[in-house]
Image (cartoon, rainbow, N blue to C red):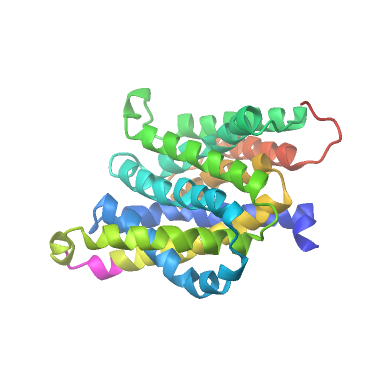
């Protein structure tokens, strides 16, 4: 099966990193007209709508024993993080948001060890350290970076990465018998209506007053359809066929694409940036590499 191929899994990691690395820019664009709450809800609604035909078709596979885990995957893995990231990006740069997102594998490993009694490999631990060092280096290498610039809004992203870790481990431990399509479509079947009901209670008068709102809505639609629906289909399929930590290591590659977006926007890239990218990619390789020696 192609999903078992390590090279294919790494290619999916790169695709996901590109999609999610671009999503922070789309969030910033959407927030020019919409409130963080509206933008977060729209992201979920758009994803749910595009997945609806698949969701309805997968209802026959919905089992009562899977309900709790699907709710966790939906609300903890997608719903709440969508709002947390939007709120955070009202006060921090999108590139920094992408870099902070690289905490996900760390929390994934910790949650797995504490709550799911999963083993870990020494290569995974080394990979996590390399990846974290690279991500930290990218933050410190940013122009004009000062420790004081990380404000309390950054903790919204830290909380979101904790939620991602809980969801990833839950999917790996309890929903491995379902395909990525089934997990994604069924979980969004539950969170879509909640997001829509909430969205309809918000005030759209300020949105309509901004002449650029159609373009900003298009950015959020792209974010929902590609950055959420398609990305979650790929991510949940990857979780099923690899370790939870390996799948979550995609967040280490995201800062690389954040830097590349910076180059496209005219920002300067130094040798330090390139060195940090090398650390990140080396870390992902070690995390994904198979070995027989595991520590319980």
Can residue 29 be seen? no
Residue 122 painted magenta: no
User: Count the marks: how many?
Assistant: 0
Say which quadrant the C terminus sits in: top right
Q: Outermost residue, front direction?
A: 64
Residue 158 lies, with reference to residue 222, above or below; the image says above
Q: Percent x, y for residue 259?
A: 49, 45
Residue 1 vs residue 67: left or right?
Answer: right
Rendered residue at 38%/57% (across/down): 26
Q: Percent x, y for residue 178?
A: 66, 58
Q: Percent x, y for residue 100?
A: 46, 36
Please name whichever residue, 269 or 13, is drawn nearer the observer in this view of the structure: 13
Say which quadrant the N terminus sits in: bottom right
Rendered residue at 53%/34% (across/down): 103
Please name whichever residue, 207 or 135, is drawn nearer the observer in this view of the structure: 207
Residue 173 lies, with reference to residue 221, above or below; the image says above
Q: Percent x, y for residue 111?
A: 59, 32
Residue 255 vs residue 150: left or right?
Answer: right
Q: Outermost residue, right direction?
A: 292
Please name whichever residue, 278 or 208, is drawn nearer the observer in this view of the structure: 208
Q: Outermost residue, top direction?
A: 147
Can residue 22 be seen? yes
Residue 253 lies, with reference to residue 19, above or below; the image says above
Residue 52 vs residue 28: left or right?
Answer: right
Q: Which residue range is magenta in the image? A: 210-215
Residue 268 vs residue 284: left or right?
Answer: left
Please name whichever residue, 122 or 179, is drawn nearer the observer in this view of the structure: 179
Residue 214 painted magenta: yes
Residue 81 lies, with reference to residue 143, above or below; the image says below
């Amino acid at each position: 099966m192609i999903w078992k191929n390590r090279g294919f899994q790494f290619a999916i990691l790169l695709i996901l990193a590109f999609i999610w690395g671009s999503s922070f820019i789309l969030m910033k664009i959407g927030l020019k007209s919409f409130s963080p709450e509206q933008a977060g809800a729209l992201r979920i609604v758009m994803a749910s709508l595009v997945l609806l035909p698949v969701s309805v078709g997968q209802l026959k596979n919905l089992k009562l024993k899977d309900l709790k885990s699907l709710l966790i995957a939906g609300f903890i893995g997608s719903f709440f993080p969508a709002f947390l990231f939007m709120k955070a990006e009202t006060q921090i740069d999108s590139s920094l948001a992408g870099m902070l997102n690289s905490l996900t594998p760390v929390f994934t490993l910790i949650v797995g060890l504490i709550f799911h009694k999963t083993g870990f490999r020494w290569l995974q631990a080394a990979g996590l350290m390399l990846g974290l060092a690279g991500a930290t280096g990218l933050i410190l290498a940013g122009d004009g970076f000062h420790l004081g610039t990380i404000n309390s809004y950054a903790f919204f992203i830290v909380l979101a990465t904790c939620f991602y870790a809980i969801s990833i481990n839950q999917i790996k431990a309890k929903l491995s018998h379902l395909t990525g399509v089934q997990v994604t479509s069924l979980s969004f079947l539950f969170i879509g209506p909640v997001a829509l009901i909430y969205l309809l209670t918000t005030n759209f008068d300020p949105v309509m007053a901004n002449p650029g709102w159609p373009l900003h809505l298009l950015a959020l639609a792209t974010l929902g359809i590609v950055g959420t629906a398609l990305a979650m289909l790929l991510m949940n399929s990857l979780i099923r066929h690899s370790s939870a930590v390996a799948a979550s290591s995609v967040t280490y590659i995201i800062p690389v694409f954040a830097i590349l977006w910076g180059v496209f926007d005219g920002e300067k890239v130094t040798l330090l940036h390139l060195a940090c990218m090398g650390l990140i990619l080396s870390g992902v390789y070690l995390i994904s590499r198979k070995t027989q020696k595991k520590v319980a």
